[in-house]
Amino acid sequence: MPTGYRHSQNDVVYEEDQYELTEDGRIPIPYRRAPKYQDGNTIDWLHEEGLERERNHALRSQAGVRGILLPALESVRMWFIVIVTGIGIGIAGAWLDVLVKWLGDLREGRCSYGFFYNSNACCTGLDAGEICQEWQSWGDYFNVHSILGHSLLQAAIYVVLSIAFAGSAALLVVTYAPHAFHTGIPEIKAILGGYVFDAFLTPWTLLVKALVLALAVASGLSLGKEGPLVHVACCMAHFLLRLFKEFRNNEAQKRRVLAAAAAAGVSVAFGSPLGGVLFGLEELDTFANESDVMWRGFVASAIAAVSLQWVNPFGTAKLVLFQVTFVSDRWRAFELIPWVTLGVIGGVLGALLIRLNVEIALYRRNSILGEWPILEVISVSAVTAAVSYLIVFARVQTSELVANLFQECDPTKGDYHGLCNPTATTQNVFLLCLTAILKVVLTAWTFGMMVPAGIFLPTIGIGACIGRAMGLIMQSLYRAYPTAWIFLSCPPDPSVRCISPGFYAVIGASAMLGGVTRMTISLVVILFELTGALSHVLPIMICVMTSKWVGDYMGKDGIYSVWIAMRRYPWLPPVDYRDKGETAANIMKPLSQVVVIEDGVTTVAELKALLARYQYHGFPIIDKHTEFVGYATRQELISVLDLLQLDDSDHDQGKICTFSQNRMRVPAEERIDLSSALEDSIIQLRKEVSQELVVNMFQKLNLRQILFTHAGKLTGLVTKRDVVDLLTSHFPHAAALSQHPHHSRQP
Amino acid sequence: MPTGYRHSQNDVVYEEDQYELTEDGRIPIPYRRAPKYQDGNTIDWLHEEGLERERNHALRSQAGVRGILLPALESVRMWFIVIVTGIGIGIAGAWLDVLVKWLGDLREGRCSYGFFYNSNACCTGLDAGEICQEWQSWGDYFNVHSILGHSLLQAAIYVVLSIAFAGSAALLVVTYAPHAFHTGIPEIKAILGGYVFDAFLTPWTLLVKALVLALAVASGLSLGKEGPLVHVACCMAHFLLRLFKEFRNNEAQKRRVLAAAAAAGVSVAFGSPLGGVLFGLEELDTFANESDVMWRGFVASAIAAVSLQWVNPFGTAKLVLFQVTFVSDRWRAFELIPWVTLGVIGGVLGALLIRLNVEIALYRRNSILGEWPILEVISVSAVTAAVSYLIVFARVQTSELVANLFQECDPTKGDYHGLCNPTATTQNVFLLCLTAILKVVLTAWTFGMMVPAGIFLPTIGIGACIGRAMGLIMQSLYRAYPTAWIFLSCPPDPSVRCISPGFYAVIGASAMLGGVTRMTISLVVILFELTGALSHVLPIMICVMTSKWVGDYMGKDGIYSVWIAMRRYPWLPPVDYRDKGETAANIMKPLSQVVVIEDGVTTVAELKALLARYQYHGFPIIDKHTEFVGYATRQELISVLDLLQLDDSDHDQGKICTFSQNRMRVPAEERIDLSSALEDSIIQLRKEVSQELVVNMFQKLNLRQILFTHAGKLTGLVTKRDVVDLLTSHFPHAAALSQHPHHSRQP
């Protein structure tokens, strides 16, 4: 029988995990309806929904009070998980902020009255203008008075601590939780789409990732905490889900709760509860048409944000991370020119960053570099720390840099590294561009190393640098030619401010994010909630639009899609797929390549041999004339066979398996009836339907397979993997980083 | 043959619209692939998508430059429509505002130096504190000096003009465009879901609705302009769509563009570009899984908002309609108690408003009231004007009232009708509650009369009154007991402000909107963009959550769903439907009740008779043994028959119709091959699948029918109408207001 049918990874095993055929060829598996999928599988949503429906029905039909209480209890458990996850991730996010701030400050100095205070906590209670004496730089602490010695000591401790943080982070990840590396968003997207990857969500991964994330961020590597926080939130929810049987046994329900957790993660990462819901809606594509799931995401997001605000790590009691203060709420039409330009730059630079990141990831996989992950992290962090220390804007935490770049110049608040000095514009623009370029290269390298690494914050940093540079250029142009026609709508007196470079930085950040992630609406909402820049919604929207257009022109996929394709996760992007005239026959596995069971022909012994030989998820059943009878999953066949308690006699083993009315052709004593193993939820199409309809059905119904029949005869089948391969076929490096051995490319 | 198959309204006619069988039984219809659906039909998305795909393929496969240019031109046309609609609705919205303001002010007075100035334009250029002499009340204008006479004249002109505006609005609607009444959102939802209702989108409706809307709003009736503006935007897009053949002939593509227009409409109505996109996403449920459509909505929204801002009707250059200024960005935990209470009140009052509105609508339909629509509008507007004139908060336009209720008390800006007078709290609370109750009753009556009427603004008004009242109560409690434990987090000095009653009004509005519309995320976003209250996102979210929970408990549907159900539009709500154990067999029309064509049995004459007799959308084809062969739409059968150019001889008319390989059984000269009429995109299921899977497939794939087979044999079919009826079965007044005669209930 042909083996072309590709789905060997999608096998289902029972809770005993592994089994061997017993000597007599019997399959030693007890009757269990709920299978445990192995990592690397794709769940069968229709089957899971069917199980859930049966379970609900059974619960509700219980007599008396139990029939009312038990379903209510289920609902209570679900909300318990959603709410506790929200609270948990809110608190975790807050304490992570505190830890990062403290570790980051430690690289520059210490608090004289307590090692455990960060620079802000150390200097609280001072009046405006008073200089903080309590926070000592390492040079002061070690009493080094020569300027050169002081600087060298500072730089040395900065670099050494950075390396120590990054190195220990990598060591922990490599040793204890290899899945804790990277951002986690591609995996979460795949998991929410039906991929089974329980190793990714273990409590151990949760613990390591949360701890290591603080080290990685504090080390000054070019990475953010946003994506990993989503991963941490999902780990928390997964841990809670395992407490309750109804979720442990239903992968579809599990995913619905995980989606809410992911939204809560985004909510905490950006202090953006609405952005969290929209991220779930747009990027994770999980809430489509399921208002209940969206609703849970909404609640989880809100609760997570409340918890974060309640812990209030920095005493500001604000969710808005980078408060933007504009000189005026008005913006002028001519500013659209630099803003659209920023959109174009963001689109181009974003696409470049993605391409660079892919190339480095491929190089890492295919060279000796991949064998020394800790060394790689240490080297990159050494380079990052050394180079960053030299460039004033790169030395601080990216979040601090972004906060300052978003800020307008305000004489009363002091000048951030001379950024507001009108005579130093050229120098500032040069430094900002240098920082941006440096960060592009470092980010492309860092995103994919063996440390938890989010791409959001570095991208915002790059964009903010470019945007601020553009703002400074515009401002100096205005100062030089205040009466030029382009500045007619500005006040003619150049000492009155007309251009707000801080807002240009926000626009730059939007453009860069648009180019890298290709998100649209959720991005705009996150940026609002991040900056409070509500009055400037339109420029941000226009800029994100431009940047997405330009980026899409240079390469179709955002960074997450690219990583999903490289790791070959079975995830269907929610794109509008249009075929070029192909029909389903183009991706269909024809009948001759499909392993089938013949109704009224196959004997019990043959069926058992077939089940033992092929680990496929299920088998179509046809009769002698290739008429389609039905589809049965491997597990159901095994269960039913087991229930029938056949003995090993030749008589029993030689019985004919029947699934339909064809059984009448076989004498009653020579057959067994397996019709109860047939799946109810089987979708049939004709192979003449357009390929785009097939793709569309897989996208919208979360199917695992579609069977093709013509006039009652089976003609072939298409599985999710076929559709995923079709949709990633335009990407040259698809499956380049796949983890499962049978995913890897041919040598 | 049985006639139980319900779909008589879903017939398809050709562009000639009506036809009769010719004397010889021939069907006089030319060969046309693209059918024109009649109003009241539901489009067949799969079929439309198939046509679109063929057309695209044909375009791209054209030789040379044409193969590149033509598809590009199509894309240009689509963007042209999206952009022009955006600009058009932006400008229309702005001028509508101007018109409403002028007409509204006219009820109270006139500008001494020009009849065409509204009160604001009349009084511009004054210094702060200067009293505007140019704006004359009617009493001053007619030189009435006695106070009583002055008041009476003012009241009389106010009431008379209100009645004149409302009456002429109703007259215009009833005479020229009956579809211009009501909000339009339920119809837009149905149309976007596939309902054909071209009469609803005519240029004439556009013109009348846009003009009449201004009159209706200015008349002071309890209605808003938001929903109708969405309708106007869709009319604009529909007008533009008719210019291009590719959209005229494809109902699916048409709907994708209309969705963008609807988003632009919301964007202009609220000055909320993001809210527009989210409204499309959540309430219209059209962008699900179609990133292209969402993207168009995003662009249309942004462009519409830019146009609105560019026209800048009130010289503020701001999109934020009701700027909220908070005393502090902080809020305190104890405030959650009044806010959640407001959420509960909003949920209850919202559900009550819906129920009241339904009862009044039923009463209107079933009593003599329905025959006197203009008189009803005149009476209600007279009552509204008379009662509103007596209550100080109800006298002004609702938008002005809301703007003032959202405002914090600021001694420098003057006091709005004594709202900030701390000694008049009891009186204010009483007046606000009275206004809210009055508005609930008036809104429930007005929403459904023969004038364009949005529900959003009156709902916001009611909520703002209640919220402000709650805020005043809390404030006076705080003033009376500043040291009570509940106010511990406030400053102990009661002269320092702790409670912001203006923000309570915002919360109240959110709660009320949540209760009436049952929207969540888009509502929160619209409220942000409406008020600029970004720092208070969390309380708004919590309040909307509470109100939706409470509202859902009291009645499952929001106001739009209720109207859709009452008018029996074939619209599938995006709810998570869960069955109680039923299978598809429960809603399936069994084979015995379905009109079928028998492959290899039916003759040409029989087929023609069947096509003439049954106006169904299509017919399943089975062979002698009820084996399922395929499905053919009525139009395809007619087309193919026509192409074959059979003569009227007994020989030709007696030929056997064949659709499959069964044809071999019939001699070649006695048969005709109709297999080209078979639809490719036919979905088959088994009748044992759960009812929830069937509903889910209809919801997500926008299907028109599903066929059920078992082991190759046809067992029945389910159509969209069956699913819609199933989903509205919980609502007692379903179809109570349906327009089509065959929709109405049995007498």
Image (spheres, coloured by chain):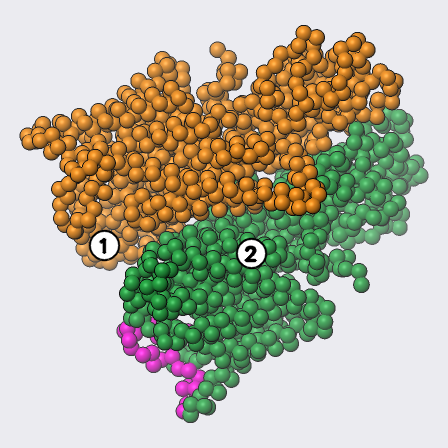
Chain colours: A green, B orange
Say which amino acid is labelled 1: Arg
Point out the image quarter for the N terminus of chain A. top right
In the displayed structure, B365 sits above or below B289; it is above
Point out the image quarter for the C terminus of chain A. bottom right
Kindly identify the residue that appears in the image at 33 percent across and 49 percent down. B318
Which range of residues does the magenta coloring cover? Answer: A118-145
Is A410 in the magenta?
A: no
Mark 1 residue element: loop
Q: Which mark is residue A42?
A: none
Pointer 2 local density, CA inside 10 Å: few below 14, some 14–19, many at least 20: many
Q: Quadrant of residue B523?
A: top left
Q: Nearer the viewer, mark 1 or mark 2?
A: 2
Pointer 1 local density, CA inside 10 Å: few below 14, some 14–19, many at least 20: some
Is the C-beta separation of discs 1 and 2 under 8 Å? Answer: no
Kindly identify the residue that appears in the image at 42 percent across and 68 percent down. A473
Left or right of residue B588, residue A30 in this image:
right
Q: Are marks 1 and 2 on the same chain?
A: no
Dominant secondary-structure state across the stretch colored magenta? loop
Left or right of residue A589, residue B469 in this image:
left
The picture places residue B5, in percent across and down from the top left corner, at: 63, 18
Mark 2 residue element: helix
Kindly identify the residue that appears in the image at 28 percent across and 52 percent down. B325
Q: Residue furthest left?
A: B146
| Badge 2: chain ID | A
Q: Quadrant of residue B104?
A: top left
Foreground: A497 or A62? A497
Question: Is there any visible trace of residue B174 in the rendered image?
Answer: yes
The picture places residue A163, in percent across and down from the top left corner, at: 56, 78
The picture places residue A582, in percent across and down from the top left corner, at: 73, 41
**Residue of label 1:** B497
Q: Which mark is residue A550?
A: 2
Kindly identify the residue that appears in the image at 74 percent across and 49 percent down. A10
